Image: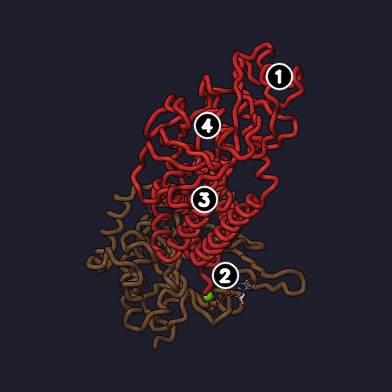
Amino acid sequence: MAWVALQMLYGDRAKYFGLVFGVMFATLLMAQQTSIFVSLMQRTSSQVTSVREADIWVMDPRVQYYDEPEPMPATDLDRVRGVPGVTWAVPYFRGLTNVRAPGGLLNQVFLLGLDDASLIGGPQRMILGSVEDLRRPDAIIIDRAGHEFIWPGEPLAIGRQIEMNDRTATIVGISEADAPFTTFPIVHTRYTNALKFAAGGRNRMSYILARSDGDASAVARRVADVTGLQARTSADFAWQTIRYYLARTGIPVNFGITVTLGFIVGAAIVGQTFYIFVLENMKQFGALKAIGVTNTTLAGMVLLQGAVVALVGYGLGVGLSAGFFAATDGVTALRGFSMPWQIMVGTAAAVLMIMVLSIFASLRRVMVLDPAIVFRG
Amino acid sequence: MLAVSCRQVVKEFGEGQTRVRVLHGVDLEIPAGELTMLVGPSGCGKTTLISIIAGILSFESGTVELFGQDLSQLKSADLVRFRRRTLGFIFQQYNLLPALSAAENAAVPLLAAGMARSAAVGKARDLLARLGLGEHLGKLPNQLSGGQQQRVAIARALVHEPKLIVCDEPTAALDAGSGQTVMGLLRDAAVAADRGVIVVTHDNRIYRYADRIAEMSDGRITSVDTPQHQKVA
Ligand SMILES: Nc1ncnc2c1ncn2[C@@H]1O[C@H](COP(=O)(O)OP(=O)(O)OP(=O)(O)O)[C@@H](O)[C@H]1O
Ligand SMILES: [Mg+2]
């Protein structure tokens, strides 16, 4: 009878497409929007997670999230280095500055200053040049997005000079940096250069990057206890930053509304259409009941119909969503956006819920259906 | 052999003030090997009675036996199984599944009994060919005339070789000619020594296909006779 159930479903083209469309629409909206939301939130902490060498970030106790560091005195560095369990600790500068391209255009960029000796915290992926090239005088590495931004349409090139804070900097490398939330270009340079290139110029150590000898969270706690500074594992600090954006911006509400609408509209379309589908087949179900098809078999038929709709709709929705991310892979503004498997699982659960809600009402009607209706007009 | 035996069957509908008695103690015997028609004015309780005989409607009191099996002795799950094996149904409005072809529709009782699809549809095809629908096996119900659809319904009612066929107004939706054809085919295909056939009808033009006619009036059987003694148009 499973086959009969499927023929009933496929036979009613209009409703079958309506049902699949409803599930697909809800899936697409939920999966795609949630993915973009998660990707955006990951961007807020991308500059923390992209520093792979360090597992502890030390900062002024007042710092709430990555983008607003408070300068620390240089002496703090030695105090951190003196804490047992800290293998190494290096200064790290994070600031904003202006770049004047040869055309005269002024752009704001992220300026990241790496420890002069170790160059720890440099870009993970280089397209042109190497991190070691930063040792040259006034050397900077700019990310591909920044290059495209400053010289749109021009091929990537090193050796170019630009003005930063009225000083000349030489591009010695092009990196593929993880996109930051604000999508400003990312410029890496040595710590001492960063102090020159940034406005202000005095000692502005933003963070201390440190490596523990094992248990990062225990060492971080010890650093905080001993120095009175704020010390976090990289993962903690990334989450702290994400939480800040979640709490302080309307972004989650915005995406939340879209995703909820996707769920509600999808559930409404699917629930309504499925109910009508089952209702229109009431006489057939009645005839099957009279003929001797058990309630269990009929329930199985309805569940199978629902399951097929859910599966096909979900498959198409997730496929389209994945297609979107594949198609926009080359778009610089959307780089790094993807659909994590957790979202696919979550969307599947939401679709399951839509289907359960939709089937519930219709299934009841079939179960209590009196086969005696078959002899009544 | 008795196909159906009803004794003092009482049926009431509704609750409290609006409760009405529709069958006032029906006694009726339907022998196997014959086609019995159940006739009578509208509202006299014909559909109610065959629904009870077919085991799809409960009743207040009395006994209904099908081939010696007392229906009230069956638990509901057993009753469903009993219906599946013992009964074939033909409805006024055919009640075919619109998405299935003629052959597939006729195969439904076999599918419901768990037979593999190819075997079931094969058997249904043979039967449809005997009913003159050999050319239309693959057509959907909406590609068939009313008479052809009712022939598919006859095949569906017979394909699993049930012992009792119940039909409610099988020709009411058909023109006179198709009605005659359908009744002729039904008679030829359905009547068998160990099988009972009950046809509820209003249509006195088909009385001649009956071996026996039971007249009903106001919830009682008033006479059972051969068609020769009925007014035939
Ligand atoms: N589910 C029901 N609830 C209440 N009354 C009912 C119900 N079904 C039938 N009746 C009543 O029972 C009586 C007999 O109905 P039934 O359908 O058996 O008559 P019938 O002889 O088949 O009539 P017709 O020739 O018009 O089909 C009618 O008065 C009808 O109104
Ligand atoms: Mg009737």
Amino acid on which the number 3 mark rests in the picture:
Leu
Amino acid on which the number 1 mark rests in the picture:
Val
Under tag 4, what secondary structure?
Answer: loop
Q: CA distance from mark 4 to mark 1?
A: 22 Å
Residue A110's x, y, as percent? 55, 40
Amino acid on which the number 2 mark rests in the picture:
Thr
Amino acid on which the number 4 mark rests in the picture:
Ser
Mark 4 chain: A
Q: Which residue is mark 2?
A: B48
Q: Residues within 10 Å of mark 1 (few under 14, many from 20)?
A: many
Q: Which residue is mark 1?
A: A223
Q: Which residue is mark 3?
A: A106
Please identify, in this view, whether the residue under mark 3 or under mark 2 is nearer the observer: 3
Rendered hue of chain B is brown
Looking at the image, which is closer to me, B48 or A202? A202
Under tag 2, what secondary structure?
Answer: helix
Please identify, in this view, whether the residue under mark 4 or under mark 2 is nearer the observer: 4
- Residue drawn at the location 52% of the way across and 46% of the way down: A183
In this view of the protein, can residue A323 be seen by the observer? no
